[in-house]
Amino acid sequence: MIKAVLIDDDGNLREGMRMMINLYAPEIQIVGEADSVKSGTELMETAKPDIAFLDILMNDGTGFDILEKLNEKFGNVNYHIIFITAHEEFAIKAFRFSALDFLLKPVNPEELQTVLKKIKNVIHQNNDNKNIGLLLENIQKRSDGFKKIALSTSDGIHLFEIKDIIRCESEDNYTKFFIKNHKTVMISKTLKEYEELLKDQGFERIHQSHLINLNELKSYIRKEGGFVIMSDDSQLPVSQRKKERLQELIGKL
């Protein structure tokens, strides 16, 4: 049995979540509920759940306050957090950079099923919650200038400096990351998702299959259809419709 807690100041939302979890994931047992930062922190300490469904905004603070209190008291704790939030662009971006799961209010049953399926697949995976530390760091700074990204692979979660990513390459519905002084990392998300995430961090999509870090670009060769040479000496094609945009960006470097 997988133990879970619900922490949200909206009683109706908690009731709806409880019903959906019972319906879609009966192996997950709700062992406690809380409606504030204070009661939520106490519940997390006593229940020691495998999963916490955690609201962002509550009457006496935020879900981040709970995580900060627990981190201060216990350090890294082995639990899975699923954030529940209204559509708040900065928080959602921070979740994505931290490879953390979230649900938008009102909670969509299909989205909940997707998250539950993912969590059940990794529930027994060793998780040192580096990504929660990264999230708290980004939230505290309250800046879009994210420095690190968490990449979730089949063997765990890995943190990398964004500036060390040389390029990303599409492989069907997967994305392969090429990172300085590190073996390639394969992530089960599409290149389009990372294009959206990294486009404000100095990355540019130059081809259907390639997203590059402009700071790692060595050369742009116009002949033979046009291609770039990256700092790892890889040669990547530039699509016809991306050439003008790329030349414009190079002129600004």
Image: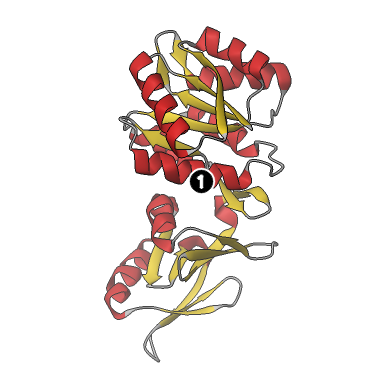
Q: Amino acid at mark 1?
A: Lys
Quarter containing the C terminus:
bottom left
Name the secondary structure under disc 1. Answer: helix
Q: Position of residue 187 (x, y in %)?
A: 55, 59
Compared to residue 128, the image places residue 207 above or below, namely: below
Q: Pick whichever, 236 or 157, lies toward us.
A: 157
Q: Residue at x 53, y 41 (%)?
A: 98
Question: Relative to the observer, which residue lies in front, 13 or 221?
Answer: 13
Quarter of the picture containing the N terminus is top right
Tell me if mark 1 has few (under 14), some (14-19) or many (20+) residues whose alpha carbon lies within 10 angstroms of its own: few
* Render colour scheme: secondary structure
Q: Is residue 246 left or right of residue 212?
A: left
Figure check: 35 above or below 79: above
The residue that appears at 47% across and 10% down in the rendered structure is: 36
163 with respect to 194 (left or right): right
Residue linked to disc 1: 117
Q: Is residue 140 above or below residue 146?
A: above
Look at 41% across and 27% down and name the residue there: 19
Residue 3: image location, x then y, percent = 61, 27
119 sits to left or right of 242: right
